[in-house]
Image (cartoon, rainbow, N blue to C red):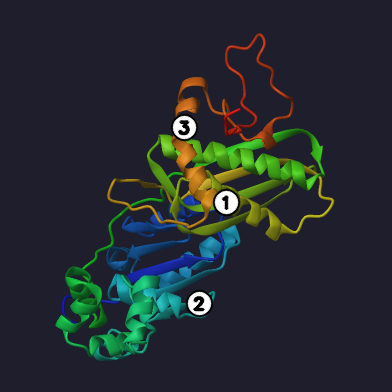
Amino acid sequence: MTGTSTAVTVLHLRCHQPTFDVYRQLFGVLADITPVVQALPPDSAILQLAGAVKYFGQSPAELADLLQTRIAARFGLVTTGGLGNSRLMAALAAYTARPGTVQLLPDDPATALAFLHTQDIRLLPGVGPALEKKVRRYGIDTIGELAAIPVATVQRIAGASIGRLLAERANGTDRRTVTPAGPPATISSSRRFDRDVLDPAEIRRALLDLALDLGTRLRAAGQSARAVELQVTYADRSSTTRSRTLPEATGHSPALREALYSLFGVLGLERARIRAVTARAGGLATVTAAHGVQLTFDAAAEAARTLEPVLDKAAARYGTGAVAPAALAAVQATLSGCSVCRITSVKVRRSHPT
């Protein structure tokens, strides 16, 4: 395969449902084997084992088994891995492996290329949902079918630069290297109740408050989140944690709110005595002007987005929570004697001529 090494030393390792904290701790274990580790949030990492093979005198498969054993012993996590001669091949090996195993691709270029060409087109890096639909309309369902098309045709379908890149990868060339990088930071927010709470409505109000806080802080930092995690702590101090990857990176409070509501609903808690809730935003990325905003065609959602800059200005001047939804108001605010009050609701009254 042109442009790639035949040495099968790249390991793609995927953990099954790690919490944000555990995901960060994983890199201490991985770094014990090789310093060349790149985070792939929210649950994966890619490792270059070439140096570790020489240092430990073990094969890549033996090192992968050692990592899986250590991760299972320390965190109780199931991991699935793939070993290949490039990031592309290692990822495909991991995606098609049975859970809890490591799939080792052969170092024979022809055999590895045959494996690549049998895979579904959606697994090729660079093919997102929109492009997948487009290429399937042309009858292209596998990576091999894409590889058989002239480069000029692929560029006409996907665009000049993306088309050239996809044509290279479909023919087994992946120029990406493993760049050492740890997991991105997270932003967290917690609400601890004065008493054990049973009322789901009160929990939802707390989740709304968390979403507003996370959204405000993300936008103030010029960042967006790709994943959200919810931790529920009970009266006996035990806790349950669930996480979800968002459809698109966002810093908008309504999207964060809906994700938290959904995660709480999945828990199916009935009559559970809850002491605290914690929300975390992970997979953080810097928002640039080049990033477009996906229209929702939802009037309420678009209105909320339009209002967010106003709320952010109020938070910057008066502090977080100076302006909040009426659902969060425990006590009706009064204007007398207050220089700054919590605004519990805003109504626009249309004036009519008398």
Near-viewer residue (96 or 302)? 302
Tell me: 350 left or right of 232. left
Amino acid type indicated by mark 1? Glu
**Crowd rating for badge 1 (residues with CA inside 10 Å; few <14, some 14–19, many 20+):** many
Near-viewer residue (62 or 81)? 81
Considering only order in the chain, which callout, 2 or 1, is on the residue closer to the N terminus?
Answer: 2
Residue 23, image x and y in percent? 50, 54
**Crowd rating for badge 3 (residues with CA inside 10 Å; few <14, some 14–19, many 20+):** few
Residue 203, quarter of the rendered image: top right
User: From the viewer's perspective, is residue 54 above or below residue 34?
Assistant: below
User: Which secondary structure, mark 2?
Assistant: loop
Q: Where is mark 1, residue-wise?
A: 229
User: Which secondary structure, mark 1?
Assistant: strand
Residue 83 seen in the figure: no
Between the residue at mark 1 and the residue at mark 3, the CA separation in whole angstroms equals 27 Å
Residue 40, image x and y in percent? 40, 59
Question: Who's the residue at 36% across and 89% down the image?
Answer: 118
Q: Where is mark 3, residue-wise?
A: 310
Residue 259, image x and y in percent? 58, 54
Residue 38 seen in the figure: yes
Question: Who's the residue at 17% across and 71% down the image?
Answer: 160
User: From the viewer's perspective, is residue 247 above or below residue 194?
Assistant: below
Mark in front: 1 vs 3: 3
Q: Where is mark 2, residue-wise?
A: 101
Considering only order in the chain, which callout, 3 or 1, is on the residue closer to the N terminus?
Answer: 1
